[in-house]
């Protein structure tokens, strides 16, 4: 078996869902999804020559060739791995199909048949769409969705948060996440000190959600690296009464040892990792047992095999895995194969509540995909699912090739 082509397609969804297809000379094709990045598909095209003509079964070896090819361009970490990760996932899908086994089997077998999924709820409303540099945009589907569920003026009040939480629980989710870094205040880029009023406002929103959903629903909060350590200590302590699942990305990402100080200062569990790459990017956090949960993004952390290795390393230090995920249903299912195959899995993110076609781009599984906040892991060869190209094409990003 030899690789004959590498192609890409981009869907303009809540983010740029970027699909990578690796084709082989026996007529099979594997598909992977990569986390969006500026210039991503051009990077895939530039890297494709590294694996063209090669035998796709030697996934790790090809992965290392791709890493080597990117050695001058950023192989320690960064968006080169978004491309390599999507290509690696496509290789596993291809190899699984060729061998007639699911990807979870290739990763060591299953610990579970269903994956617990938590619903990311953003703030008081959830509808959003961003380009590759996080520029806000309004594709046609967004404008139609907004016309139906027009965000009201009140999106940051405790009542808006509580209402949004009740809606997610009514859809069957028993684990939620909300953004708490939502107030637009001049100077936030510089991680300014927070006022007591701002901290009280954060606590009021979290209190309202906890009151709305009761004690049995898991509730995480996300800070997007926005605060200084002393402020986060105050926030975390203010949130201690609400039995949080975790507080995510509380401090700027550049000093992992801040987590050690924070862990000692609060009982709220800590989570980070969506912007880290490879085991090596997590190593300091893991060896210091600085966090309770790691949140690698399975569409960019380095690949399914690298995520498996990361999970095993974390497991040695009693750290659980709560993978970040903003992918389409296709990428989410790919992540589910990894989640099924690791012992220390906690929960997987679902970020598509407000994308009307989130699961329509997927073929091969019964809909709705998410029932009672759980995702079944497919047992078919490879990833066990296919991209619905007819639907995906409806939302194709202008100017991008569509597997051409
Ligand atoms: Mg996050």
Image (cartoon, grey):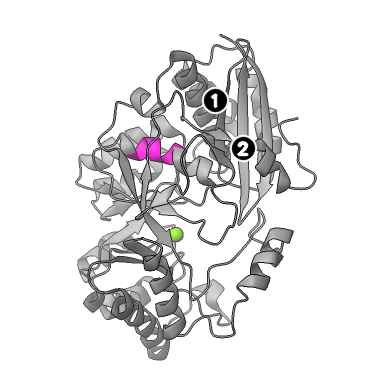
Q: Where does label 1 land, which residue?
A: 68
Q: Is residue 396 above or below residue 32?
A: below
SS category of the residue bearing label 1: helix
Residue extending farthest to the bottom is 197
Q: Is residue 61 above or below residue 222?
A: above
* Residue 339 x, y percent position in the rendering: 34, 40
Q: Where does label 2 land, which residue?
A: 388
**Badge 2 density bin: few <14, some 14–19, many ≥20, Cα 10 Å:** some
Tag nearer the camera, 2 or 1: 2
Q: Is residue 89 above or below residue 325?
A: above
SS category of the residue bearing label 2: loop
Please state if 83 lies on the left or on the right of 313 as rendered: right
Q: Say whether residue 340 is visible.
A: yes
Q: Disc number at residue 239?
A: none
**Does 335 appear in magenta?**
yes
Q: Earlier in the sequence, mark 2 or mark 1?
A: 1
Please state if 59 lies on the left or on the right of 203 as rendered: right
Question: Quick check: which quadrant has ligand 1?
Answer: bottom left
Q: What is the C-alpha distance between the residues marked 2 and 1?
A: 33 Å
Determine the residue positioned at 40% across, 79% down.
162
Determine the residue positioned at 41% across, 27% down.
103
**Does 392 appear in magenta?**
no
What segment carries the magenta color?
Answer: 334-339
Q: Quadrant of residue 78?
A: top right
Determine the residue positioned at 46% across, 64% down.
224
Q: Nearer the viewer, residue 294 or 137?
A: 137
Residue extending farthest to the right is 399
* Residue 263 x, y percent position in the rendering: 24, 64
Q: Quadrant of the C terminus?
A: top right
Mark 1 Cβ and ligand 1 under 8 Å apart? no
Q: Quadrant of residue 390?
A: top right
Q: Say whether residue 63 is visible.
A: no
């Amino acid at each position: 078996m030899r690789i004959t082509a590498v192609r890409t397609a981009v869907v303009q969804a809540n983010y740029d869902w970027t699909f990578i297809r690796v084709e082989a000379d026996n007529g099979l094709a594997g598909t992977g999804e990569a986390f969006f990045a500026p210039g991503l598909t051009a990077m895939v095209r530039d890297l494709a020559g590294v694996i063209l003509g090669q035998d796709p079964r030697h996934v790790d070896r090809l992965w290392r060739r791709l890493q080597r090819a990117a050695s001058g361009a950023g192989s320690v970490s960064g968006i080169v791995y978004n491309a390599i990760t999507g290509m690696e996932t496509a290789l596993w899908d291809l190899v699984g199909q060729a061998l007639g086994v699911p990807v979870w089997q290739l990763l060591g077998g299953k610990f579970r048949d269903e994956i617990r999924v938590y619903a990311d709820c953003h703030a008081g409303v959830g509808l959003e769409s961003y380009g590759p540099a996080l520029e806000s945009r309004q594709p046609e589907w967004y404008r139609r969705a907004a016309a139906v569920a027009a965000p009201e003026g009140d999106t940051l009040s405790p009542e808006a948060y509580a209402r949004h939480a009740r809606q997610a629980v009514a859809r069957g989710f028993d684990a939620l996440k909300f953004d708490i870094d939502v107030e637009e205040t001049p100077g936030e880029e510089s991680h300014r000190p927070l006022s007591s009023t701002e901290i009280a406002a954060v606590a009021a929103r979290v209190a309202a959600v906890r009151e709305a959903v009761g004690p049995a629903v898991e509730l995480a909060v996300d800070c997007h690296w926005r605060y200084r350590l002393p402020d986060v200590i105050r926030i975390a302590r203010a949130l201690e009464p609400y039995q949080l699942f975790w507080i995510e990305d509380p401090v700027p990402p550049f000093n992992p040892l801040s987590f050690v100080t924070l862990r000692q200062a609060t009982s709220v569990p800590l989570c980070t990792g969506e912007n880290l790459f490879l085991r090596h990017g997590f190593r300091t956090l893991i060896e210091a047992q600085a966090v309770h949960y790691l949140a690698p993004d399975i569409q960019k952390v380095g690949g399914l095999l690298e995520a498996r290795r990361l999970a095993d390393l974390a497991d040695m230090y009693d750290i659980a895995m709560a993978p970040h995920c903003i992918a389409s249903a296709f990428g989410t299912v790919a992540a589910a194969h990894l989640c099924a195959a690791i012992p220390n899995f906690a929960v997987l993110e679902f970020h598509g509540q407000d994308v009307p076609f989130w699961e329509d781009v997927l073929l091969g599984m019964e809909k709705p995909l998410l029932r009672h906040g759980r995702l079944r892991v497919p047992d078919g060869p490879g990833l066990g699912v296919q991209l619905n190209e007819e639907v995906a094409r409806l939302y194709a990003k202008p100017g991008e090739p569509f597997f051409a």
